[in-house]
Image (tube, grey):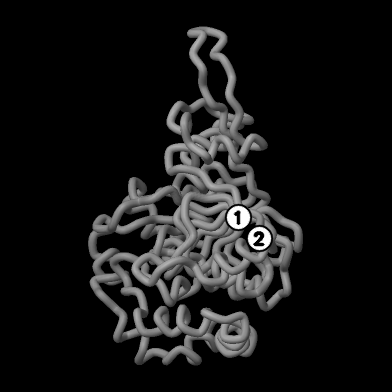
């Protein structure tokens, strides 16, 4: 088996300006925030970003002026309102947007997993989503039934970034027995061309072998895996730690203006030289411990 364990900068080095990237996670859970902060520090720009229900990862990229286009079902901050930097970019014309329903985005990912250019759906008939996006959603007549259907284009990204729970150095990623809803990270992984995964902890391959059914992303799909504890902060990883509500509220407040967003990036993204420095800037081990919801890794290992 090939050793795929890398540093964060090594794993992300193939991603250049102009790339299309897909970001895993949903709402305030498992956003690949550490990876996104590293991309911003590297100066990557002009990105097309595909997401499910995007929050902090997409919005930080928007704050850095790195997003040219967004394709997804939602861009906001859950209970804290809309994503301020994404909204400002769309309203100002610097970010192009293509909206999709959940059904349509799932069909796009399924098309990519099957190597198909598109898949048919019915659910967007009568919606302005289809009317305004004839580039990726087109009506056709089924050659078998004669029905009117809509074809939605496959969600094909150059790179996919996912933050997971635990994995081994060969890229096998596992989830805990007790977890929240699974969202579409597994589907995103299967649809990916080049998949980069950050995880809370790298465990020995023997641990993975004890419960192979917990492996939701097999190593053959993964290009690089990186151990990044608290890599989703300030959002949550279910079973490990809760979202940092105070930090999120401060982020949204500062990002009400371009100047405030720039100051946030300077303090928490550009000034810290790496992820460990970032964790120090947001409160260090004491703050991370306060967010720990347990049982986390210890309980997960106990059920292996």
Q: Between residue 7 and residue 129, name the one nearer to us.
A: 129
- First in sequence: mark 1 vs mark 2: 1
Q: Is residue 273 visible?
A: no
Percent across and percent down for residue 71 are 58, 50
Q: Secondary structure at mark 1?
A: strand
Q: Which residue is mark 1?
A: 70
Q: Is residue 158 above or below residue 287?
A: above
Give the number of the mark in front: 1 or 2: 2
Q: Are marks 1 and 2 in contact (CB under 8 Å)?
A: yes
Q: Is residue 155 above or below residue 148?
A: below
Q: Residue at x 49, y 42 (%)?
A: 105
Marks 1/2: CA–CA distance: 7 Å
Q: Between residue 68 and residue 160, name the one nearer to us.
A: 68
Percent across and percent down for residue 250 are 43, 85
Quadrant of res 67: bottom right
Q: Which residue is mark 2?
A: 95
Q: Residue at x 49, y 60 (%)?
A: 75
Position of residue 236 in the picture relative to residue 33 (left or right): left
Percent across and percent down for residue 121 are 48, 28
Classify the position of the C terminus by image quarter. Answer: bottom left
Q: Secondary structure at mark 2?
A: loop
The numbered dot on residue 191 is: none
Within 10 angstroms of label 1, few (less than 14), some, or many (20 or more) residues? many
């Amino acid at each position: 088996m090939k050793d795929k364990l890398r540093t964060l900068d090594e794993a992300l080095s193939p991603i250049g300006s102009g790339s299309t990237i897909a970001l895993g996670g949903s709402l305030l859970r498992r956003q690949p925030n550490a990876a996104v902060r590293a991309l911003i520090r590297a100066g990557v720009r002009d990105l097309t970003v595909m997401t499910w229900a995007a929050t902090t990862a997409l919005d930080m990229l928007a704050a850095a002026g790195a997003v040219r286009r967004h394709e997804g079902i939602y861009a906001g901050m859950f209970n804290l309102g809309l994503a301020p930097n994404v909204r400002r970019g769309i309203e100002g014309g610097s970010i192009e947007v293509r909206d999709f329903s959940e059904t349509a985005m799932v069909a796009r990912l399924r098309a990519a997993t099957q190597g198909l250019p598109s898949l048919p759906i019915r659910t967007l008939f009568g919606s302005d989503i289809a009317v305004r996006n004839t580039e990726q959603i087109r009506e056709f007549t089924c050659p078998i039934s004669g029905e009117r259907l809509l074809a939605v284009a496959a969600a094909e990204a150059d790179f996919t970034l996912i933050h997971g729970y635990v994995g081994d150095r060969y890229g096998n990623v596992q989830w805990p027995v007790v977890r929240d809803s699974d969202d579409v990270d597994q589907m995103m992984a299967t649809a990916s061309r080049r998949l980069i995964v950050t995880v809370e902890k790298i465990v020995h391959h023997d641990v993975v072998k004890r419960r192979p059914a917990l492996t939701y992303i097999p190593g053959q799909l993964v290009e690089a895996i990186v151990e990044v504890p608290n890599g989703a902060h300030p959002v949550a990883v279910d079973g490990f730690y809760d979202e940092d509500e105070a930090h999120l509220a401060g982020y949204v407040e500062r990002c009400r203006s371009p100047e405030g967003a720039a100051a946030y990036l300077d303090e928490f993204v550009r000034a810290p030289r790496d992820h460990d420095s970032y964790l120090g800037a947001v409160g260090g081990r004491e703050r991370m411990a306060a967010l720990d919801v347990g049982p986390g890794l210890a309980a997960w290992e106990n059920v292996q």
